[in-house]
Image (cartoon, grey):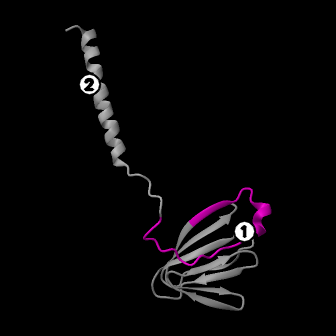
Amino acid sequence: MEPKHLLVRSIPACLAITAFFASASGLAQPAPIRETKGVEISHVESLDLSPWAHDTKGRQLRIRKLVFQPGGVVGLHSHDDRPDASYLVQGELTEYREGGYVKRRPGDTVHTAGKNVTHWVVNEGNMPAVLIVVDVFKP
């Protein structure tokens, strides 16, 4: 058989194999699920960002995990230039602000902090505490 005829005869077989793999890969991905179910959403905490609206250029949104060892402290600081919200995953923390303190447990939103908030946070327990922090900051 001439090479030209061999090439012409093999084209349909190549197309069939390509179609098979294309259809098989299409079967592997399920259709998008459109409804939410089986998910519990906690109480919503929110922080008005309008005090920073005039100063958004160069700001970034970040999320971090902080692990406080027993006795660990995030020292006194202000949130006048860095609004944030934090969620305690594990352990216990105490947040101190002017005029008092609040003890937080897993599942608590530790704080939403913005203008005129100065505080520090301490792990006064005997196990590590894990805090997830989301903030808007200038690098």
Q: Which residue is mark 2?
A: 13
State the residue in front, 129 or 34: 34
Q: Position of residue 60 (x, y in %)?
A: 66, 59
Q: Is residue 79 visible?
A: yes
Q: Which residue is mark 1?
A: 49
Q: Is residue 73 visible?
A: no
Q: Amino acid at mark 1?
A: Leu
Residue 67 falls left or right of residue 21: right
Q: Amino acid at mark 2?
A: Ala
Q: Which residues are magenta?
A: 36-63
Depth check, mark 1 against mark 2: the one in front is: 2
The residue located at (46%, 71%) in the rendering is: 39
Mark nearer the N terminus (1 vs 2): 2
Q: CA distance from mark 1 to mark 2?
A: 61 Å
Residue 122 falls left or right of residue 17: right
State the residue in front, 104 or 46: 46
Question: Is residue 40 located in the magenta-colored stretch of the structure?
Answer: yes
Q: 10 Å neighbourhood of mark 1: few (<14), some, or many (≥20)? A: few
The residue located at (76%, 66%) in the rendering is: 52
